[in-house]
């Protein structure tokens, strides 16, 4: 009899434990149902929408990578083509302008550094004599520096500013001798003749060099010029 009572008590205890677990499971089921009806309502539609967005983003990133690579190649090709055009014009202007025999022509040399995504360029002006190149910095006279600066600016304008309406030069003949002044005037005349079909083109030159003005006048490219001087009262007078 005692054994049966012990078994009965043990079964009652187990039943109580199982009933407690059952209540916990029922509460958990209710919470899950509540989540399904509220937080996870229409979860299939939400999942499909997010999945489509993720896949679209992955495809867009892949396309952007292809676009960035193609753009980088296009920029590199454009840079190379423009450098070729620029150096061609620089060489032509130098040969037609410079009257010395120590430099055949000049060119701009570009060196790139860094990865493609963060590439930078270093530019150097090189002088060429009998096929040999040497960096111009520290190896040329003041007149050669001035002439180089003007020629490079003219070449940049010709290369990148085809439709630019104004070409302005401030004291372009500084440190140039008479032969190079005349050659510079002739080179400017050639550029202007080539641009005469452009309706809005204007050449503006600020200079104290009357000889340079005379050279430009002989080329029949200057319509008029303004002379600035001081009168007896030291007032500035502008005459056309």
Image (spheres, rainbow, N blue to C red):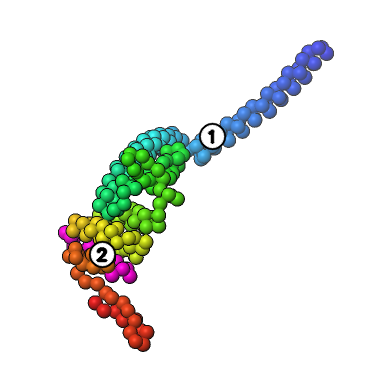
Q: Examine the rendered structure and indicate whether residue 79 appears above or below residue 199.
A: above
* Residue farthest along the right direction in this orientation: 2
Q: Secondary structure at mark 1?
A: helix
Q: Residue at x 71, y 24 (%)?
A: 17
Q: Nearer the viewer, residue 27 or 205?
A: 205
Q: Is residue 164 visible?
A: no
Q: State the mark number for residue 33.
A: 1
Q: Which residues are magenta?
A: 196-210
Closer mark to the observer between disc 1 and disc 2: 2
Residue 24 in which image quadrant: top right
Q: Dot 1: few (<14), some (14–19), or many (≥20) neighbours within 10 Å?
A: few
Q: Nearer the viewer, residue 188 or 73?
A: 188
* Image-based side of 32 in relation to 118, left or right: right
Please say whether residue 206 is one of the residues in the magenta stretch. yes
The residue wearing badge 2 is 203
Q: Quadrant of the N terminus?
A: top right
Q: Examine the rendered structure and indicate whether residue 118 appears above or below residue 25.
A: below
N-term mark: 1 or 2: 1
Q: Nearer the viewer, residue 117 or 48?
A: 117
* Residue farthest along the bottom direction in this orientation: 233
Q: Residue at x 27, y 46 (%)?
A: 88
Q: Residue 25: percent from the left, percent from the top?
A: 62, 29
Q: Nearer the viewer, residue 144 or 234?
A: 144
Residue 193 in which image quadrant: bottom left
Please say whether residue 138 is one of the residues in the magenta stretch. no
Q: Residue 47: percent from the left, percent from the top?
A: 44, 35
* Image-based side of 86 in relation to 26, left or right: left
């Amino acid at each position: 009899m005692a054994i049966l009572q012990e078994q009965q008590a043990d079964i009652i205890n187990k039943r109580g434990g199982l009933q407690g677990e059952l209540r916990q499971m029922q509460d958990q089921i209710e919470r899950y149902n509540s989540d399904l009806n509220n937080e996870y309502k229409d979860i299939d539609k939400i999942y499909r929408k997010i999945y489509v967005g993720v896949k679209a983003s992955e495809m867009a990133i892949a396309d952007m990578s292809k676009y960035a690579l193609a753009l980088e190649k296009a920029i590199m090709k454009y840079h190379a083509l423009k450098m070729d055009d620029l150096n061609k014009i620089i060489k032509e202007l130098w040969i037609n302008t410079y009257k010395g025999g120590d430099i055949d022509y000049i060119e701009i040399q570009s060196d790139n550094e860094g990865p493609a995504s963060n590439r930078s360029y270093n530019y150097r002006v090189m002088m060429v004599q009998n096929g040999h190149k040497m960096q111009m910095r520290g190896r040329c006279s003041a007149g050669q520096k001035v002439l180089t600066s003007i020629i490079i600016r003219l070449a940049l304008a010709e290369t990148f500013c085809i439709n630019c309406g104004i070409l302005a030069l401030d004291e372009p003949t500084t440190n140039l001798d008479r032969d190079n002044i005349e050659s510079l005037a002739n080179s400017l005349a050639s550029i202007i003749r080539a641009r005469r079909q452009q309706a809005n083109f204007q050449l503006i030159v600020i200079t104290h060099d009357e000889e340079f003005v005379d050279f430009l006048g002989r080329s029949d490219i200057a319509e008029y010029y303004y002379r600035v001087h001081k009168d007896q009262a030291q007032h500035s007078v502008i005459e056309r």
